[in-house]
Image: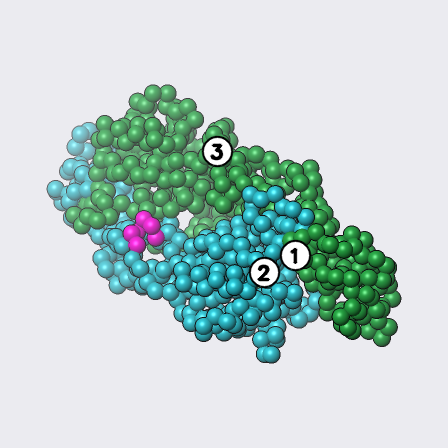
Chain colours: A green, B cyan
Amino acid sequence: MDFFRVQTTQQVKEIIKSTKPLDEEDVALEDAAGRILAEECIVQDAFPPFDRSAMDGYAVQAQDTFGASESNPTPLEVLGEVRMGERPSSSIQPGGAIKIATGGMLPEGADAVVMVEHTQVMDEHTIQVLRGVAPGENVIHRGEDLKEGEKILEKGHLLRPQDLGALAALGKVRVRVYRRPQVGIISSGDEIVPLEAIPKDGEIRDTNRYTLWALIKEAGGIPFHLGIASDDLEDLQGRIAEGLSQGDVVLISGGSSIGTRDFTVEVIESLPGAQILLHGVAVSPGKPTILAKTGEKMIWGLPGHPVSAMVIFMILVAPALWRMGGRKNWETPRPWALKAQTSRNIPSAQGREDYVRVKLREQDGMLIATPIFGKSGSISTMVKGDGLLRIAMESEGVQEGEEVEVWPF
Amino acid sequence: MDFFRVQTTQQVKEIIKSTKPLDEEDVALEDAAGRILAEECIVQDAFPPFDRSAMDGYAVQAQDTFGASESNPTPLEVLGEVRMGERPSSSIQPGGAIKIATGGMLPEGADAVVMVEHTQVMDEHTIQVLRGVAPGENVIHRGEDLKEGEKILEKGHLLRPQDLGALAALGKVRVRVYRRPQVGIISSGDEIVPLEAIPKDGEIRDTNRYTLWALIKEAGGIPFHLGIASDDLEDLQGRIAEGLSQGDVVLISGGSSIGTRDFTVEVIESLPGAQILLHGVAVSPGKPTILAKTGEKMIWGLPGHPVSAMVIFMILVAPALWRMGGRKNWETPRPWALKAQTSRNIPSAQGREDYVRVKLREQDGMLIATPIFGKSGSISTMVKGDGLLRIAMESEGVQEGEEVEVWPF
């Protein structure tokens, strides 16, 4: 069967790439942080909309101040004051100055601002300029920040606080963004009991429900619960179908290792239009991963081991959610990895990507990554760790002192 | 006046450090991601609570398999199967094997698991073992992941997805966390108009409201709006008082540069018990920053320039919110900065910390930081940038190719 062929993460990313972004919606600017832009933002009106002072001081004609110094100050006549939020009532004449605060509108005729620190008040109508200014000095010109017609934000951009600021400056009340993927979580296995239960012999509390919930939110998705599925075909089938009708993605954790994976595969194949695209990925931990699609909806079978499930989420499911959510840079968890040196040799099998949990520390200005060894089911390795060190597929491991990439978590 | 002395960020952090964490509350585990632990988490019951199989295969007595190989397989009698979520009904006898799936409870008498891939089924009652196992192989022992009595999470720890997983494994239904700081936002200045308004000459839309809102959330706080204050003593006074009665922190943006800062200071001083602790910080951009406290509540006067306000938020206000929120590592925006090389010389004045907006790119495995020059009021420098490059106070700048720290945003 073709789907038993283990695929590389690069191949899985090709599958993910072929998924279309979800539909679009409008949100209020205030609610747009962390959302993905579904439109290009072009500057309609120049910002600032008028020449502004960048300092507290006096608006002047720069040429009047040329050569001014502490030992040779230039006297100027104070013609008035610019009121904040208003058009200046007077304009500058040669030899004149108008008091202005930071952000005030530059009066007509002025081309520079002398900082208040570089002036001395002589009397009500006269100041001395103690340092000359060049034309344009301490002035933010109309459109100097955001030029008319300039594209400031691209479609697919993840909106950060400063982006909201720029959009506010431009008067953008509502923003067009992609809808966030809704992701249902199923924990499967007869051994899984809810958090509140006292596990009997052989039983284990549901942990993936909580880690996946938080990870989905970090990846811009909206999680919802589909409960614990027993190892019963109809039960699992019903929960997956419910998830697909309510949401865009269903995550099933557990049930993808050999013992039960035929069962999970059977359930997925029984869904109308479902196609299994991946059954096994060349990643450790996390090999027994399943990905199926029905239309544009995704079903992921994640390993039951909490660490394997988390690693696969971070390196594959999160990119898939970002991709569905319309993000341009969807491939890696963050735009940049940390560079670190390994504190010891870490062996790795060729032909698979290894994700090693590491502890980080700073030493002589270098970041040192020390691997935390432990069985892949040990959640403590993730709790004690600061990030994931990636060992490429073609590598047989890293040497002590070698520079490596770490994705902090 | 003492408070006109410009202080260093290190001095401001001493002020922040003296602030007590807020009170504590209990939340459901599911809602605990991103919250700060207000208790130590000690493992009460070992996890896993019983010896489990780490693989799909057969539980065996390791010594029965010693020397087994493909050319010299060892036959074992299959005595039954472990049902998931149940105590095994039979125990292992020498020469016997019990089928077990990943996560199944190890039967009595067994001390290892042979992976299914290393066995061959002969008939209903017999398998051949094709590779020997050592005692303990493919078994996760009781408490091997989380040991009884072990401290797994410290007070002051920011809860990540994996931490929730560990707490779920331990049956922690509710978690004691610190209350999140509630932070009121005031934009001040006669020139500021709401987003929805069409600015008249001299007027500017309120941008800080949106950037600060998003930044407060990123720093674990709960933002609320206190509106736009005109340059009127009573108006500003009223809004600050309202903020202090509703929340823990009030941020006033604008009103802290020379033109209006006496005014803001006057308003703050008029509040009962208010004490101004900082008036000017040796940081560029962002020098005209005010910090006052009344009891344990904080009032920050941020520069009106959006970039200065954002930089000060990131390097000082965010740490203050984390500190109030009980976080142990509250001093830096993230635990680790990126290391990059500068693409060109960047001059800096000694005696102040400089935060330069940079664009990052990867080149030959190195991260290259290119400064984006622009007046500090230019929000476009933050929008085009990928992070802040810090130039230390004692430095006169960095040379092209020098290694620098960048805090991504």
Note whether residue B314 is visible. no
Q: Nearer the viewer, residue B293 or B200?
A: B200
Residue drawn where x is 18% and y is 40% of the image: B82
Look at the image and give the residue range highlighted in magenta.
B27-32
Q: Residue at x 61, y 38 (%)?
A: A41
Question: Measured along the vertical axis of the image, is residue B68 above or below residue B390?
Answer: above
- Tell if the residue under mark 3 belongs to the same chain as the one under mark 2: no
Magenta stretch contains residue B29: yes
The amino acid sitting under disc 2 is Asp
Which residue was labeled with disc 1?
Answer: A84
Are the two marked residues, 1 and 2, in contact with CB atoms closer than 8 angstroms? yes
- Quick check: A171 left or right of B299? right
On screen, residue A286 versus residue B8, left or right, reads left
**Disc 1 residue crowd, few under 14, some 14–19, many 20+, Cα 10 Å:** many
**Amino acid carrying mark 1 in the image:** Met
Give the total of numbered labels: 3
The label number, if any, that marks residue B231 in the structure image: 2
User: Could you tell me which residue is drawn at 86 percent across and 73 percent down?
Assistant: A72
Looking at the image, the residue that sits furthest to the top is: A272
